[in-house]
Image: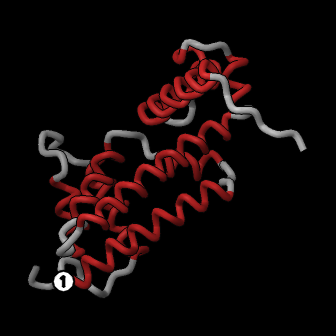
Amino acid sequence: MESQRPMRADARRNRERILQTARQAFATEGLGVSLDEIARRAGVGPGTVHRHFPAKEALIEEVLTEHLASLTEQARQAVRTDRDGSAFFPFLHSLISEARAKQDLADALSQADVKLSERTQETALHLRQAFGELLVRAQEAGTVRTDVDAEDVQAVVLGALTAERQNPTPDRPGRMAAVVLDCLLPEGG
């Protein structure tokens, strides 16, 4: 078995430049941006992109995995600092605000027929676990109704995101999401 050598500093910088460029391109333009265009924008040759990411799906998945890991860390941070169940709604609003500013990567992935690796699936599982813990804390504190589960909340968040994207008054960002998320408040809340 061949041992993998550590990446040279210039190769690490090129890889990060490619990822940064791909993150921005996918977020603003969707997954239709070609690898050659990403290479051009990153200031590297197409061969450099292909050495790091042999197929576009590998680059898409790396961007998705990083995004899921970032969301997981945000959820875990919310769990660590939540003392009274009040971190749940700010986390949801942050999630929706971030997604509103980008093209929805998850929607695009489902249309692109990208098969997710075990690593990405495991990262998604960690996010679901952290989110579930945040939900349970909010329910125990009485800030979220107890008859909903994480799947229900996911559907509500998607509805809130859709409402934000269709918002007839863009000068009031977050308003439509807040209206939709109110359905998670306990009765009389």
Q: Secondary structure at mark 1?
A: loop
Rendered position, 157 above or below 58? below
Quadrant in the rendering for residue 85: bottom left
At 59% from the left and 42% from the top, the residue drawn is 62
> Quadrant of the image for the N terminus?
top right
Q: Please name whichever residue, 135 or 185, is drawn nearer the observer in this view of the structure.
A: 135
Q: How is the image coloured?
A: secondary structure
Tell me if 46 is positioned left or right of 145 in this view.
right
Quadrant in the rendering for residue 86: bottom left
Look at label 1 and name its amino acid.
Answer: Gly
Quadrant in the rendering for residue 161: bottom left
Q: Position of residue 18 (x, y in %)?
A: 56, 25
> Quadrant of the image for the C terminus?
bottom left
Tell me if 162 is positioned left or right of 41 in this view.
left
At 23% from the left and 78% from the top, the residue drawn is 144
At 17% from the left and 63% from the top, the residue drawn is 179
Q: Residue furthest right?
A: 1
Q: Position of residue 3 (x, y in %)?
A: 82, 40
Rendered position, 27 above or below 145? above
Q: Please name whichever residue, 185 or 125, is drawn nearer the observer in this view of the structure.
A: 125
Rendered position, 103 above or below 116? above
Residue on which the image places disc 1: 142
Q: Residue furthest left?
A: 188
Rendered position, 167 above or below 130? above
Q: Position of residue 143 (x, y in %)?
A: 18, 77
At 20% from the left and 82% from the top, the residue drawn is 141
Q: Please name whichever residue, 21 or 31, is drawn nearer the observer in this view of the structure.
A: 21
Q: Position of residue 6 (x, y in %)?
A: 69, 32
Q: Please name whichever residue, 97 or 140, is drawn nearer the observer in this view of the structure.
A: 140
